[in-house]
Amino acid sequence: MSRLIVISNRVSAGGGAQGGLAVALTAALREMGGIWFGWSGDVTEEFSGHISFRRRGGVTTATIDLEEQDVAEYYDGYANRTLWPLFHYRIDLAEFERDFAGGYQRTNERFADTVAPLIEPADVVWVQDYHMFPLGAELRKRGLKNRIGFFLHIPWPPRRLLVTLPEAPDLVRALLEYDVIGFHTEEWLQSFCDYARDELGGTIDGHDLLTLGDRTVRLVACPIGIEAKEFAELATQDVARETCERVIGSAVGRALIVGVDRLDYSKGLEERFLGYERFLSEHPEERKEVVLLQIAPPSRGSVDSYQRIRSTLEGLAGRINGAHAALDWVPIRYVNQGYSREVLAGVYRASRVGLVTPLRDGMNLVAKEYVAAQDPANPGVLILSRFAGAAEQMTDALLINPHSAEEIADAIRQALRMPLDERIRRWRALMDGVLEQDVFWWGRRFTDALMAEPVEAA
Ligand code: GDG
């Protein structure tokens, strides 16, 4: 059987504090076997291409260190200051610098130089995310004939936004060197087609074959899931149970509303706080009946826009608490630190409402985790942004426009008043989807497409 070579910017360190992508890939690699290659997260004085191999959590990892300039231009720069904001429709935050683009290309070449010798002819290669658009093309330049796939974990922006990126034509042409490109949703897939067709003259054959010049690539909409069964079980085990009891106890009879997000402007935290404030102002009678618990571990702290969102939220939480708090009640508990997955599972289970309101999100795994952690006999209600990729699948959530404080406020009220039979009906439908289209389903669906017969140019 072919091995799977996963290549992504960061390789999971194992352990409890893994992000959504890390959990998903560890699970896929455990099932299929192979190597996970990427940046160690460490900096070296001079790039050497030295690879550190480790076996952790049933997965072999191969990591390299990068130079400080690579990190500044490729990671903090092009990936997080240019591509991330632009691909989340935040052209106002995107920084266009030739040095960033140059460093991004150079670092991708370094990744290609180091990983190419590890890849055997029968291996299947799966490259992850926006840090690595050009990697497939660089591997082809080094003679690789393997099946190489690419999966984008973030949205693909509309054509009218993408044309602002000077390197967009080159990046899209480089993507054509992959055999299969995966997106979470039809919407992101269609935006990619629009750009390739209208800006570059590509042709779309049927629904899923895109041809540009002498290259044809297969496009798949393949929504990522979670380890649903395992997460549901985790939510009933000791740590989660104790957490659940402690959190419910601390709310002294009030309904808990929970948010869990990396501290990132795409997650709509500011708008969420404003929506909750609106709810408090419009329904003073509900005031002391609820508590919003927002867990937001800081991320990408070296990027200015992330420092700004942090101080904006601190100010906003302080203002709302100042205006509404009573002697024995604080409306928002805002926590800037991460917790283990076991603890998170317990917090989700303790919460009557899961508030997931990104302004744009490729998928959003918190929405799925919240559902998986619920007590089937007394489940909470998921409020979900229409602009999360997850909304395409999770139509039994209360879907809202996260820009509208009114819609958020109305949905909170509706969720708090929802009768048990409706909560159970909605949760059951959501849970069936989360269980069926889990992370293993995602991994198989993508790798099946990647290992299918090569496509011929039309
Ligand atoms: C990208 C895309 C896409 C959060 N706080 C803690 C913690 N988390 C975990 C959550 C969840 C993960 O991080 C976040 O995943 P999301 O999907 O919500 O968002 P991104 O990190 O932006 O991920 C996204 C994803 O890739 C996969 O394709 O869904 O759209 O943006 O698993 O639980 N985990 C722990 N402690 C925390 O405090 N342990």
Image: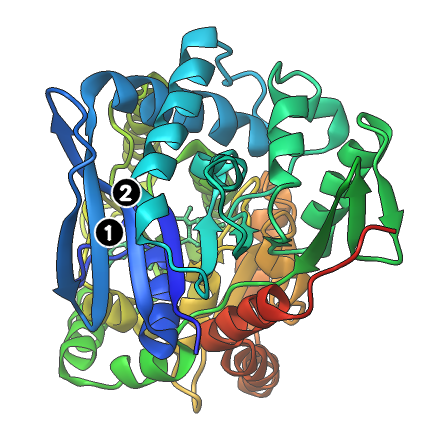
User: Which residue type carries mark 1?
Assistant: Trp
Where is residue 118 shown, x and y percent of the image? 30, 52
- Number of marks: 2
User: Which residue type carries mark 2?
Assistant: Ala
Q: With respect to residue 335, does 424 lie above or below?
A: below
Q: With respect to residue 60, does 441 lie above or below?
A: below
Q: In this view, does 254 lie to the left or right of 47?
A: right
Residue at 69% in and 24% down: 161
The secondary structure type at the circle numbered 1 is: loop
Residue at 50% in and 18% down: 93
Q: In this view, does 310 lie to the left or right of 221?
A: left
Disc number placed over residue 379 in the picture, else none: none
Disc number placed over residue 325 in the picture, else none: 2
Q: With respect to residue 245, does 398 lie above or below?
A: above
Look at the image and name its color scheme: rainbow
Q: Using a 10 Å C-alpha cutoff, classify the residue at mark 2 as few (fewer than 14 neighbours), some (14 to 19) or many (20 or more).
A: some
Q: Is residue 187 left or right of residue 148?
A: right
Q: Using a 10 Å C-alpha cutoff, classify the residue at mark 1 as few (fewer than 14 neighbours), some (14 to 19) or many (20 or more).
A: some
User: Does the residue tagged 1 have its C-beta within 8 Å of any atom of ligand 1?
Assistant: no
Where is residue 151 shown, x and y percent of the image? 53, 52
Front residue of 104/161: it is 104
Question: Farthest residue toward the top?
Answer: 98
Residue at 59% in and 43% down: 155
Can residue 15 be seen in this snapshot?
no
Quarter of the picture containing the N terminus is bottom left
The secondary structure type at the circle numbered 2 is: loop
Q: In which quarter of the image is residue 193?
A: top right
Where is residue 413 shown, x and y percent of the image? 55, 60
Question: Farthest residue toward the bottom?
Answer: 377
Residue behind mark 1? 329
CA–CA distance between discs 2 and 1? 6 Å
